[in-house]
Amino acid sequence: MTQSRRMSLIEAITNVAVGYALALATQIVVFPWFGLHPSLGENLAIGAIFMGISLLRSYTLRRLFERWCSRPHRS
């Protein structure tokens, strides 16, 4: 059974949204340990940049694996 492009996108968006929330919380806690004190807006922007990259990566890898798995296997 293959996954549609739409479901791949929904999965990727969900995965990245959860990752964004976790990354934002982690940044707020960890950055000060390294002497970095970005504002909430800066933390949101940093997270958004990585979220966009992560969404593209996640969707692309999902589609590649779907393509590989849906190919007829040669014996």
Image: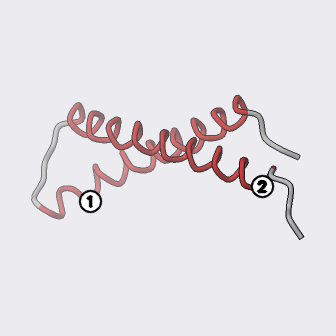
Q: Distance between the Cα atoms at labels 1 and 2? A: 39 Å
Which residue appears farthest toward the bottom when viewing the image? 75
- Residue at x-position 48% and y-position 40%: 56
Q: Would residue 10 appear left or right of 26 to someone viewing this image?
A: right
Q: Nearer the viewer, mark 1 or mark 2?
A: 2
**Nearer to me, 4 or 67:** 67
Q: Which mark is residue 16?
A: none
Q: Quadrant of residue 11?
A: top right
Residue 24 picture location, percent across and down: 36, 45
Q: Is residue 23 left or right of residue 2?
A: left
Q: Which residue is mark 2?
A: 69
Please state, as top left, top right, bottom left or bottom right, where the C terminus lies in the image: bottom right
Q: Residue at x 17, y 37 (%)?
A: 39
Q: What residue sits 70% from the left and 29% below the top?
A: 6
Asked which secondary structure carries label 2, the reply is helix
Q: Is residue 62 above or below residue 33?
A: above
Q: How is the image coloured?
A: secondary structure
Q: Secondary structure at mark 1?
A: helix
The kind of residue on which mark 2 rests is Cys
Query: Where does residue 40 sit, x and y in percent of width and height?
Result: 24, 35
| Label 2 crowd bin: few (<14), some (14–19), many (20+), radius 10 Å | few
Q: Relative to residue 18, is residue 22 drawn left or right? A: left
Q: Residues within 10 Å of mark 1 (few under 14, many from 20)?
A: some
> What amino acid does circle 1 point to?
Val
Quarter of the rendering containing residue 72: bottom right
Q: Which mark is residue 30?
A: 1
- Residue 19 x %, y %: 49, 47
Q: Position of residue 69 (x, y in %)?
A: 78, 55
